[in-house]
Amino acid sequence: VGSDERLDLALVEFSSPESVPVARFASEGSLRVGDWVVAVGNPLGFESTVTAGIVSALGRRPEQGELASSPTDYIQTDAAINPGNSGGALANLQGEIVGINTWIASRSGGNIGLGFAIPASVAQKAVVDFIEEGRIVYGWLGVTIGEANPNTFPDIRSDLGLGNRDGALILNVYAGSPAD
């Protein structure tokens, strides 16, 4: 139905003559640091693997240079996630989906207790976008923003009479953009 490389998510449609069980998403905001979770997937090709852990942090962003994209804040868990778990469920103990396993932070390429999942609320919005638009719709303001600190653009700061004030400096407005 649709896919998005930035989030590493896709929605597929299929039909089956049999009844297919459907997982439920957890309520938004119900997940807390310290909650027990299970990661389901096929790590390193081992099918139908389940590992357990806790939610280590919420709202994580990948560091500069990580292979993961940063259009969202991720759930961090110490449930073992390894290559092959991507797309698998991160579920709470009630079996509700709280996230979609997506990446690990590791120097070796294997799990060291730093697994990350796309929050269920982001996945739910992606599903709606895939159905309605065929793709994820990202917000776009249409500006280039720089930092207006005294070390950046000192001549422009002087010309604008900014003095010692800090803030964002709009460097460019794209023609035809929402900001235009």
Image (tube, rainbow, N blue to C red):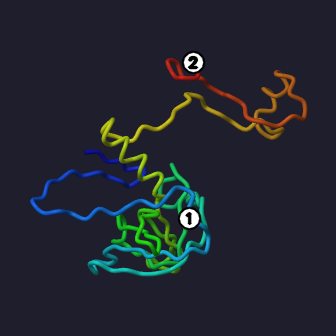
What residue is pinned by disc 2?
Answer: 180
Q: For residue 159, which quarter of the picture?
A: top right
Pick whichever, 66 or 127, lies toward us.
127
Task: Report the amino acid beneath label 2.
Answer: Asp
Pick whichever, 53 or 68, lies toward us.
53
Above or below, comparing residue 111 to residue 6 in the picture: below
- Residue 114 is marked as none
What residue is pinned by disc 1?
Answer: 31
Identify the image quadrant of the C terminus.
top right
Name the side, left or right, on which 165 lies relative to 144: right
Q: For residue 44, which quarter of the picture?
A: bottom left
Seen as rendered, the residue at the extreme left is 17
- Secondary structure at badge 1 equals loop
Above or below, comparing residue 49 to residue 177 in the picture: below
Pick whichever, 152 or 98, lies toward us.
98
Q: How many numbered circles are shown?
A: 2
Query: Circle 1: is it few (<14), some (14-19), or many (20+) Cα within 10 Å?
Result: some
Query: Circle 2: is it few (<14), some (14-19), or many (20+) Cα within 10 Å?
Result: few
Residue 4 position in % (x across, y down): 36, 47
- Secondary structure at badge 2 equals loop
Name the side, left or right, on which 102 lies relative to 178: left
Residue 130 position in % (x across, y down): 33, 43
Mark 2 or 1, nearer chain start? 1
Pick whichever, 156 or 68, lies toward us.
68
Residue at the (68%, 28%) spot, across then down: 170
Identify the image quadrant of the N terminus.
top left
